[in-house]
Amino acid sequence: MEWLLVSLGLIILLLAGDALVRGAVNLSLRVGIPALIVSLTIVAFGTSAPELLISLQAAMKDAPGIAMGNVVGSNTANILLVLGVPAILATLHTSHCNSRRTYLFMIAASLLFIALAFQGVFTFWSGVILLAALSIVLGDAFYQARCHRRDAKALAAEEEEVEGADPDMPWWRIGLFMVLGLIGLPLGADLMVDNAEVIARRYGVSDTVIGLTLIALGTSLPELATTVMAALRRQADVALGNVIGSNMFNLLAIIGITSLVHPIPVDPEFLEFDLWVMLGASILIVPFVFLKQDITRRWGIALTVMYLTYILVVLT
């Protein structure tokens, strides 16, 4: 029964990911906001909902390994797996994306998170600092969106670049896609992770390992589903923006909110290995952000192999 429910959760995730991409892209066209900005806010919030629910639950049940592993493992999976697998299916034309500014915000958020982690525990004030940083990121995103709306020429160019979008889609249909996506993603992830955790417990796996592998992979499935659909629709800005935005929300919002509710002790293993793997994975995408390179099939295979290698190291 657990395996059946895991499969059902995966199907819900794929359908919800497609709905969210459709709604986000068409919403950006209707209100004059770039698809990248929408993916950094609405899409990222929707796909990060499972991480927030699981981290809160883990912290309240005194399982900090799951809470921390969930975020750190998800960010690593987002870069290596969520960008790797879609690139194997279809080249991500990231050379056309302007994501330098948001990428630098993500690196800054990663460094801030690591610095706070070296205190040994995420306290209430750690949460305040992380959420303050999140407010700066969101404020900048909305400022950039307003600037874009003032540029009619840029708006026209954006409409021409986005393929498969319908600028005349009715508002009720856009809203329906967004609602189905935002509800379906956490629902599918919860259904899959809850039952996958039951399966993993049978093998006596620790909370930290569960958080870094099974839970992190399960909660990264919304990002994977959304990015796969975006890649197939040749909307690389949504794919890359979704990963960068989700990583920032994981670090700043998920742990920020969770630490306000309950302190999160940091296992020394995170400080010695996993946090640096997360940072290293983030640095790996510099060529796609700054050097205008596409994520080709070869890159996709390389990123995916790196992730599988990391999982094997964690499990052994």
Image: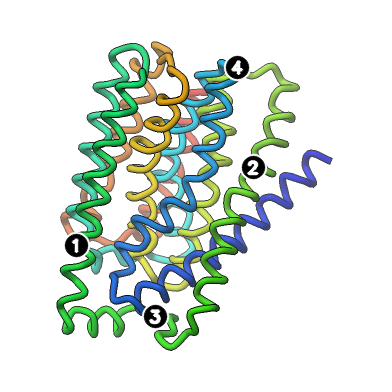
Residue assigned mark 3: 163
Q: Which residue is mark 2?
A: 190
CA gap between label 2 and label 4 equals: 20 Å
Identified at 29% across, 32% down, the residue is: 130
Q: Are marks 2 and 1 in contact (CB under 8 Å)?
A: no
Q: CA distance from mark 4 to mark 1?
A: 43 Å
Tell me: residue 170, above or below residue 243.
Answer: below
Q: Please identify the quadrant where the N terminus is shown.
A: top right
Q: With respect to residue 59, does 170 lie above or below?
A: below
Q: Nearer the viewer, residue 186 or 170?
A: 170
Does residue 59 appear in the picture of this structure?
yes
Dot in front, 2 or 1: 1
The earlier-in-sequence mark between 1 and 3 is 1
Which colour style is shown? rainbow
Residue found 25% across the figure and 65% down from its top:
97
- Image quadrant assignment for residue 15: bottom right
Mark 1 burial class by Cα count in 10 Å: few <14, some 14-19, many 20+: some
Query: Looking at the picture, which amino acid does disc 2 mark?
Result: Asp
Query: Tag 2: Cα neighbours inside 10 Å, few (<14), some, or many (≥20)?
Result: many
Using the image, determine if residue 226 lies above or below residue 247: below
User: How far from the left and from the top, in percent, is residue 122?
Assistant: 36, 19
Sooner in the amino-acid sequence: mark 2 or mark 1 = 1
Location of mark 1 (residue): 144
The mark lying in front, picked from 3 and 2, is 2
